[in-house]
Amino acid sequence: MDISHIEHLGIAVKSIADSLPYYENVLGLKCYNIEEVADQKVKTAFFKVGQTKIELLEPTSEDSTIAKFIEKRGEGVHHVAFAVKDVAASLAEAESKGVQLIDKAPRGGAEGLNIAFLHPKSTKGVLTELCCN
Ligand code: CO
């Protein structure tokens, strides 16, 4: 699949505003971008940690998958995103190896990335995102 690094960790939070003091004042990270992804019904906030990012995900609607995640499991790590060279090819490879896909084809995510998710049923419980610029 040719993974180069962990592109980001997605972390579900009830409120980005309430989470910023921890990330900025305690961890000393700097939020460099806040962006709404309308089709996913989330607001995102980004921090760089080396070449990996932290992506905070705040639901913007009750029926957002992030709202449902928080309701069920509370705030916390939501997904791991691996950087790959080619999302479509990686999806095809995963599917050929028996992995259940959430996205059959890459779609647009925050920060202009091409993204696609693998189903946690097939990934030992970790919602897994594949992405590339
Ligand atoms: Co993500």
Image (cartoon, rainbow, N blue to C red):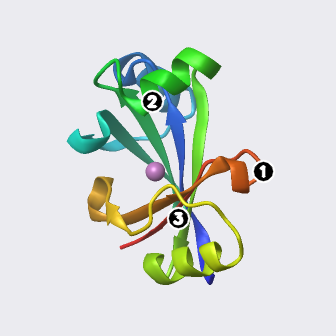
Percent of width and height locating residue 64: 37, 28
Instruction: Judge the density around disc 2: few (<14), some (14-19), many (≥20) Cα neighbours within 10 Å.
Output: many
Local SS, label 1: loop
Distance between the alpha carbons at the discs numbered 2 and 3: 25 Å
Judge depth for marks 2 and 3 and give the one in front.
Answer: 2
User: Residue at image x 53%, y 36%?
Assistant: 11
Instruction: State the mark number for residue 124.
Output: 1
Residue at left offset 60%, top offset 52%: 119
Front-lying residue, 57 or 67: 67
Q: In x, y percent, where is residue 115?
A: 41, 63
**Dividing the image into 4 quarters, which one contains the C terminus?**
bottom left
Q: Say which element carries label 3.
A: loop
Q: Depth-wise, is mark 1 or mark 3 nearer the camera? A: 1
Q: Is residue 103 above or below residue 10?
A: below
Which residue carries the number 2 mark? Answer: 66
**Dot 1 amino acid type:** Lys
Q: Residues within 10 Å of mark 1 (few under 14, many from 20)?
A: few
Near mark 3 (Cα within 10 A), the count class, few <14, some 14-19 or many ≥20, is few
Q: Quadrant of residue 4?
A: bottom right
Disc nearer the start of the sequence (2/3)? 3
The image quarter containing residue 6 is bottom right
Identity of the amino acid at label 3?
A: Gln
Residue 93's spot in the image, x, y percent? Answer: 61, 81
Q: Secondary structure at mark 2?
A: helix
Report the side of 57 relative to 61 (left or right): right
Residue 46 visible: yes
Q: Which mark is residue 51?
A: 3
Q: Residue furthest right?
A: 124
| Precedes in sequence: disc 1 or disc 2 | 2
In the rendered image, is residue 34 in sight?
A: no
Check mark 1 vs ligand 1: CB closer than 8 Å? yes or no. Answer: no
